[in-house]
Amino acid sequence: MANPKQANIYDVARLAKVSHQTVSRVLNNNPSIRPETKTRVLKAMESLGYRPSLAARALASSRSKMLGILSSDTDFTGPAAMVHHMEAAARAQGFFVVTVGIDANDEESVQSGIDHLMKLGIEGLALVTPQLRAVEIARAAVSGIPVVTLDSMYRMDELAVSVDNFAGGAAATQHLIDLGHKNIVHISGPQGWFESTTRAAGYTATMLNANLTPQVIDGDWQIDTGYRIGKKLDIDSKQVTALFIANDRMSLGFMHAMRERGIEVPKRLSIVGFDDLEETAYSSPPLTTLRQDFKSLGNRAMNLLLSEISGTATKKLDRLVPELIQRSSTAAPPKL
């Protein structure tokens, strides 16, 4: 036998002998409803097995208690961790989260993701994407609800939470300079990413401030890219003694190439990464790196968004300075 049609608000109204507007007011605990009317409506709901949909309640109360997350690159540890902690922070305050994955380089993908979330009646949107164009599209397309960005370029008048990647790049480079290194190479992340640009800028500024010559090699975030560059990089003739590599995955690939080439780290070459992935403490040698607190990033972003929704926000911009974690992959330069 086919399942009976699910009861709706009009079925409840007919059984309780009230208007559907009265049922809606009962659902939203309107104090104007008489106790006997409320009891009759609740009994009708129970009799029919009626469960109000989120969409219906949102229409009635203008509160869906739903938030949207538009995210790209969640196959990487950082974005995935931030989304996870944002969802947990939202649930702690009684909100549900709908996450939509997008291709941040495809404008149609970004727009369709936004359209889907807006149709659900979300009260706020979080963007976890480092691509400038995706952020521009979202901010232009979304109106009437607050939007917070994570790990993207920020303006003082927009909600944003981000790691201070410039400070991180500067700290990594200054650490190597303080050890005595002068010929320091930077392997960057992919072009068009905020993290890549700002980490490279921190490196370049610190090198120039020390009257040293910046040397940047274009990379991406992939471990095999670090390995490939490590196999090809002419270290001896250029007398390179240290590298600041834009993320830990490339750093691990690069160090593997060094082991295959018989180049000792840090005796011959010092390496600093960025992220502090769990495995970096167990690499050979353990990797000196910049720690990003992904849990704090996610929590701060969600709290900023919820504060804006409730009208209690006291700030719009929140930056976290990454922490230098010194391990065994850096040391004083060799005498060449």
Image (tube, rainbow, N blue to C red):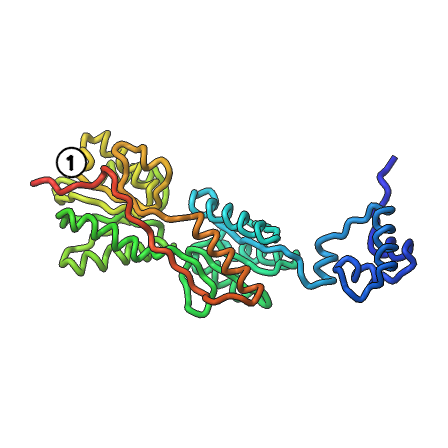
Residue ID at (65%, 59%): 121
Question: The disc labelled 1 sits on which kind of residue?
Answer: Lys
**Quadrant of the rendering where the C terminus is positioned:** top left
Within-10-Å neighbours for mark 1: few <14, some 14–19, many 20+ = some
Query: In the shown orientation, is residue 23 left or right of residue 164?
Result: right
Q: Quadrant of residue 31?
A: bottom right
- Where does the image place residue 131, in percent across and percent down from the top left? 43, 56
Tell me where residue 108 appears, x and y as whole percent: 55, 56
The spot of residue 173 in percent (x, y) is 22, 51
Q: Which residue occupies 48% across, 60% down?
A: 135
Q: Considering the image in quadrants, where does the N terminus appear?
A: top right
Q: Which residue is painted at 30% across and 53% down in the image?
A: 168
**Front residue (pair 231, 294):** 294
Residue 12: image x %, image y %? 86, 54
Q: Is residue 192 visible?
A: no
| Residue occupied by mark 1 | 267
